[in-house]
């Protein structure tokens, strides 16, 4: 039995943030084989419920699916998001969110980024996704995200928060919030179960913290699976495997070696 931690954006989704049915099916196969499966994402629980969970088969018992949303501010088991809990420690002030929202409405960002009103703990903008294969629009949205992050940095810093730029969005979050919190919670929940190795899938350098957290919890057989663009991050006593493609296409390439 193995223990899997998956980022969602850029790992189980394509370049336009659409969940990949085939990638999700491979994750489902892991669960059917008795492995422990968990999601650790910056996405909201509402987004997971509306976009990812409908792809999961009802024939599988998902009661032991461990889920972390908004980097760790929201945690729960199973696919009933109403049973998950929000840690109010990590909720930024509404006044800060309003300032961030106002910047997102600047004319230069029209058609490129939009406010994510599903987030409960943070202030987030997401790229407006174009047609599949529209590389120019993709470049423009990525530039818009970087420009937005620069414009709101003073708001984030002055309010005591931090800015996190990801594949599809920009989050302003509590300074102590990271996927480390989510990974620690999941590990504490599964520590009494039988599993001897940890496998982490991520597309950003920040996802490596999940593998590092497993190392801190005395796991010895840890592999970080990189499906991002550019060079994979490296850490002592953590093996790294890279795919030849990015996004869910890379995840499918690597997962096919784990299932069946």
Image (tube, grey):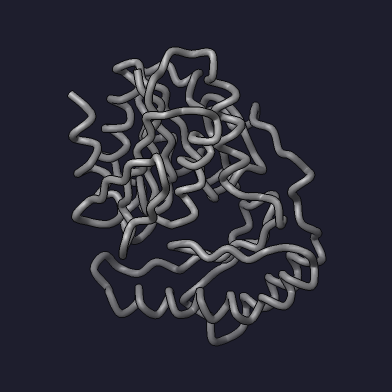
Q: Position of residue 32 (x, y in %)?
A: 31, 18
Q: Quadrant of residue 164?
A: bottom right
In the depicted structure, whether residue 35 falls above or below residue 82: above
Q: Position of residue 229 (x, y in %)?
A: 31, 63
Between 186 and 32, the residue placed more toward the observer is 186
Between 72 and 183, the residue placed more toward the observer is 183
Is 104 left, or right, of 102 in this rendering?
A: left
Q: Position of residue 240 (x, y in %)?
A: 31, 46
Q: Quadrant of residue 103?
A: bottom right
In the depicted structure, whether residue 139 falls above or below residue 79: below
Q: Quadrant of residue 159?
A: bottom right
Is 140 left, or right, of 250 in this rendering?
A: right
In the depicted structure, whether residue 52 falls above or below residue 29: below
Quadrant showing the C terminus: top left
Is 34 left, or right, of 44 in this rendering?
A: left
Residue located 81% across and 59% down the image: 93
Is 215 left, or right, of 115 in this rendering?
A: left
Residue located 55% across and 27% down the image: 187
């Amino acid at each position: 039995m193995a223990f899997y931690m998956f980022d969602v954006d850029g790992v189980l989704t394509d370049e336009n943030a659409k969940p990949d049915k085939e990638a999700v099916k491979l994750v489902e196969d892991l669960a059917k084989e008795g492995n422990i499966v968990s999601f650790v994402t910056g996405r909201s629980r509402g987004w997971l419920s509306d976009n990812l969970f409908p792809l999961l088969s009802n024939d599988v018992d998902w009661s032991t699916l461990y889920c972390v949303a908004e980097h760790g501010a929201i945690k729960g088991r199973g696919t009933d998001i109403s049973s998950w809990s929000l840690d109010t420690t990590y909720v930024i002030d509404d006044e800060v969110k309003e300032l961030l929202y106002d910047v997102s409405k600047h004319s230069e960002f029209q058609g490129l980024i939009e406010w994510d009103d599903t987030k409960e703990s943070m202030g987030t903008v997401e790229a407006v996704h174009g047609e599949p294969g529209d590389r120019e629009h993709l470049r423009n949205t990525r530039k818009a995200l970087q420009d937005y992050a620069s414009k709101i940095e003073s708001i984030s810093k002055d309010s005591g928060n931090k800015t996190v730029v990801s594949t599809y969005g920009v989050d302003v979050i509590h300074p102590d919030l990271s996927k480390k919190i989510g990974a620690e919670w999941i590990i504490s929940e599964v520590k009494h179960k039988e599993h001897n190795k940890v496998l982490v899938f991520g597309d950003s350098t920040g996802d490596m913290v999940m593998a590092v957290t497993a190392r801190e919890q005395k796991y010895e057989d840890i592999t970080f699976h990189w499906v991002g663009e550019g060079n994979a991050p490296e850490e002592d006593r953590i093996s790294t495997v890279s795919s030849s493609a990015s996004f869910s296409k890379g995840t499918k390439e690597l997962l096919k070696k784990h299932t069946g």
